Image: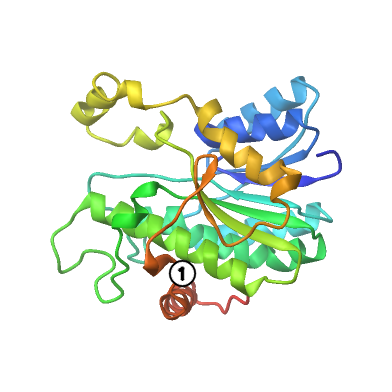
Amino acid sequence: MRGRVCLVTGASSGIGRATAEALAKAGATVVALCRNEAKGNALVEALRAEGGDAHLVVANLAAPDSVRAAAAEVLERFEALHVLVNNAGVSFMDRRTTPAGVELGFAVNYLGHFVLTTALTERLVASAPARVIHLAGIYHRKGHLDFDDPWFERKPWDWSAANAQAQLARVVFALELAQRLEGTGVTSNAVHPGAVLTEAQKDLPWYFKALIHTVMRPGFVRPEKGAAPVVRLATDPALAEVTGRFFDRAKESPTVPEASDPALAARLWAFSEALVGARADG
């Protein structure tokens, strides 16, 4: 991976940090995109202490203007971009929204990555061969894209449904991006890393976290193991031309029909452009 520039969102902890560490050890130049500057600096310092080439870019994925500024910074500081890992994610039991009224989980988990990826697409194409990896939970299979009431303003709030909707959006985007970038040398795949103990669970109620750390704990893995399939998609030569797929950990896995529905994908793309107030040509 020497000479390869890899950007990882949400790199300060969990799967993102483990991915950044693995890529740095493989010789890549790691660009850590983090919301928390202090945690991001701590990661960069740790990677550099181990001999890695690491850099920090600060951005709030819930704010499109912040993401655009971060993308502009990446384009200014780095002449190439070979790997983009859309890892950052959050989960809230209560309903939260951005100042623009977008449900916060959808904003961070999907929309911010849509803005970032489309802003960096031209650089990825110019740097080809390149890869985009989108982390997405297996529970996207239970998701539904409700364009009429996406933020649960009229229907009762359901944190599980909201999370599944955002995860489905990530998969739809991953597969649609693969179609739009066909023939460019840039691949786009989605991956479920498994059940991983990360900071994404920090906003869950205490009783739910207690359940995860006791009864459910045997089914969860450490971030390093969760990062393994992500790192494989970023580095394995055998996967250089694999695109438009969904992986359940190390194995390619079928997804729901909605994930590869071109009409739904086109609608989501247009919906996303309208939300962020800019045309995004993938």
The residue that label 1 is drawn on is: 260
Residue 2 image position (x, y, % from top left): 85, 38
Q: Depth check: give the residue in front, 175 or 44.
A: 175
Position of the N terminus, as image quadrant, is top right
> Is 9 above or below relative to 199?
below
Colour scheme: rainbow
Query: Which residue is found at the position 48% from the left and 71% from the top?
Result: 276
Residue 170 image position (x, y, % from top left): 46, 59
Query: Which residue is found at the position 35% from the left and 34% from the top?
Result: 201
- Camera sees residue 93: yes
Indicate the amino acid at tag 1.
Ser
Left or right? Give the position of 229 relative to 4.
left
Could you tell me which secondary element the residue under label 1 belongs to? helix
Q: Quadrant of residue 195?
A: top left
Query: Which residue is found at the position 19% from the left and 54% from the top?
Result: 158
Q: Depth check: give the residue in front, 172 or 256.
A: 256
Category of crowding for the residue at label 1, using alpha-carbon neighbours closer than 10 angstroms: few (below 14), some (14–19), many (at least 20): some
Position of the C terminus, as image quadrant, is bottom right
Residue 260 image position (x, y, % from top left): 46, 69
Residue 17 image position (x, y, % from top left): 58, 32
